[in-house]
Amino acid sequence: MKDETVVLIKPDGVRKGIIGEIMARFERVGLKIAAAKMIWVDKTFVGKHYQDKDAYHKTVGTKILENYQKFGLDANESLGTKDPVKIGRMVRNWNMEFLSSGPVFAMLLEGPDAVLIVRKIVGSTFPADALPGTIRGDFSLDSAYISNLQRRTTQNVIHASGSKEEAEFEKKLWFKNSEIYKY
Ligand code: ADP
């Protein structure tokens, strides 16, 4: 049984004109493109993608706090709170703004261990951590700290499902059955 995973080239990636470059990296490792389309969604739709669940907010918020700690920065100063749930909720709102600010290029990719393989090719969330050779490492330069001070999301070009469960949910959210090809 092959895995499936959802990839979204976010509005910054689409504006940079690197859709082809990104698709080539997935094709190069042999992943199959089962679906692909450009789509401009609204904030409500993005709200379904980044769900309003405290457990999710906490995971995102904790990752952010760890990043602040790593750089010796004060989360309270730039975010106004040290509560991971509140921080996660804030970031969700920024993501809802950003992902609806322009067209997104959505893909459903298929292959053995597709979720893990794609996350490896995509690289770490924050551009400073993303290694050269990964998509985020090669094509993004934003800073988590600066983007937080500016009350906006960290632009990192691409989203990829974080688990098989997430992939299943996102597949149903982003694609109709008639848009998915078996070949
Ligand atoms: P990933 O996209 O790597 O799965 P997360 O699910 O933790 O990462 O976060 C979702 C998105 O929210 C990230 O890709 C990034 O664009 C944005 N984001 C994460 N942390 C921050 C932050 N501290 N400030 C602004 N935006 C953030």
Image (tube, rainbow, N blue to C red):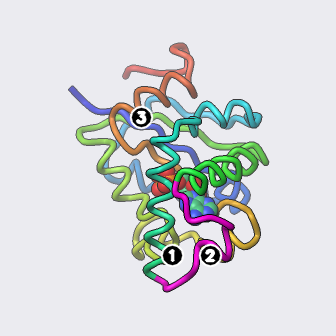
Comes first in the chain, label 3 or label 2: 2
Comes first in the chain, label 2 or label 1: 1
Residue farthest toward the top in the current orientation of the protein: 178
Q: Where are the magenta residues, as a range?
A: 71-84
The N terminus lies in quadrant: top left
Q: Residue at x 45, y 60 (%)?
A: 62
Mark 2 vs mark 1, CA separation in Å:
8 Å
In front here: 176 or 60?
Answer: 60
**Measured from the top left, where is residue 107 in percent x and y?**
52, 37
Comes first in the chain, label 3 or label 1: 1
Q: Which image quadrant for residue 47?
A: top right
Q: Are the residues at dot 3 and dot 2 in contact (C-beta closer than 8 Å)?
A: no
Q: Which residue was labeled with disc 3?
A: 166
Q: Residue at x 48, y 43 (%)?
A: 56
Q: Which residue was labeled with disc 2?
A: 145
Mark 3 vs mark 2, CA separation in Å:
27 Å
**Measured from the top left, where is residue 33 in percent x and y?**
44, 36
Amino acid under disc 1: Tyr
Q: Which image quadrant for residue 154?
A: bottom right
Ligand 1 rendered quadrant: bottom right
Q: Which residue was labeled with disc 1?
A: 68
Mark 3 vs mark 1, CA separation in Å:
26 Å
Q: Are the residues at dot 2 and dot 1 in contact (C-beta closer than 8 Å)?
A: yes
The C terminus lies in quadrant: top left
Please give left or right for residue 162 compared with residue 86 in the image.
Answer: left
Q: From the image, state whether disc 3 or disc 2 is nearer to you.
A: 2
Q: Residue at x 73, y 51 (%)?
A: 98
Amino acid under disc 2: Tyr
